[in-house]
Image (cartoon, helix red, strand yellow):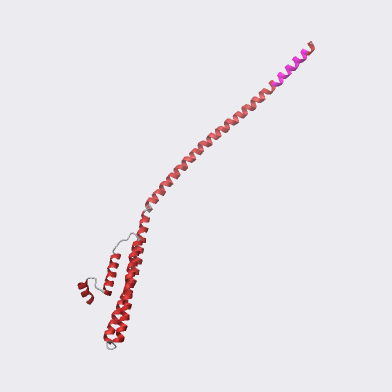
Amino acid sequence: QIIEHRLLIDGDGTGDDRRLNILLKKFLKWSNTEYTNLNESQKVIEIMLVHANLCELAIKKSQAVSRRIDEEMSTSDGVSVEIDHNIQKIKNDIILAKEELEKAKTFKRNQMEYDVLIKNIRQYPSRDETAKRLEDLKDETQALKKARDGIAKKVNKKVNKLQVILAAIENLDESSNEDSEPETKSSEGVDDKDSAMSTETE
């Protein structure tokens, strides 16, 4: 209630209260902001950690002051206990705030990584689209296989026909050679007789 009253009068307050209020405002603003750049988020976190360290230093200073007061005012035990209690309470609050800040930092980082992962996943086709594409490729492969088999059959037929033609040509060549051999021998015999007759005449 005292802090709320001071906030109503002083706004952010003064001293340690002002540091804590600034830290709280920055934390709320950071947690409600959708950062697209992890570096910007990291900078804000570092600023908040600086404020938290300043609060911790202020508490240590307050502890030193309280110890000094304890030494000078030994009779004010009740006030000293209350001050120590308040200081310890503030210290515990700062420790809790640091833990919450670290949790929020981890959550924020995981959320950004999750958003990036979802964005990358959406770039790839769905399972149904992939299955349809695979089915289309299967049909295309089967069609190409049938076309290849048809071409192979046609080529085999032409090769067989060509082999038959080549065999027929070889047979014709052999028959032609056999027919020409007797004619060559008979012509050679005629030439020999003509030569002998010419010699006798001379």
What span is in magenta? 184-198
Q: In this rendering, would 168 be left or right of 91?
A: right
Q: In this rendering, would 200 be left or right of 59?
A: right
Q: Quadrant of residue 195?
A: top right
- In the rendered view, would you say 73 is above or below 201? below
User: Front-most of 77 and 164?
Assistant: 77
Horizontal and vertical percent position of residue 18: 26, 72
Could you tell me which quadrant the N terminus lies in?
A: bottom left
Q: Residue furthest bottom?
A: 75
- In the rendered view, would you say 196 is above or below 118? above
User: Front-most of 73 and 123?
Assistant: 73
Which residue is found at the position 43% from the left and 44% from the top? Answer: 140
- In the rendered view, would you say 146 is above or below 30? above
Tally of numbered discs: 0
Horizontal and vertical percent position of residue 85: 29, 81
- In the rendered view, would you say 119 is above or below 147? below
Which residue is found at the position 55% from the left and 35% from the top? Answer: 159
Q: Quadrant of residue 173?
A: top right
Q: In this rendering, would 180 be left or right of 128?
A: right
User: Front-most of 175 and 18?
Assistant: 18
Which residue is found at the position 53% from the left and 35% from the top? Answer: 157
Q: Quadrant of residue 53?
A: bottom left
Could you tell me which quadrant the C terminus lies in?
A: top right
For the stretch drawn in magenta, the main secondary structure is helix
Asked if the magenta segment contains residue 187, the reply would be yes
Horizontal and vertical percent position of residue 123: 37, 53
Horizontal and vertical percent position of residue 98: 33, 72
Asked if the magenta segment contains residue 130, the reply would be no
Q: Residue furthest top?
A: 201
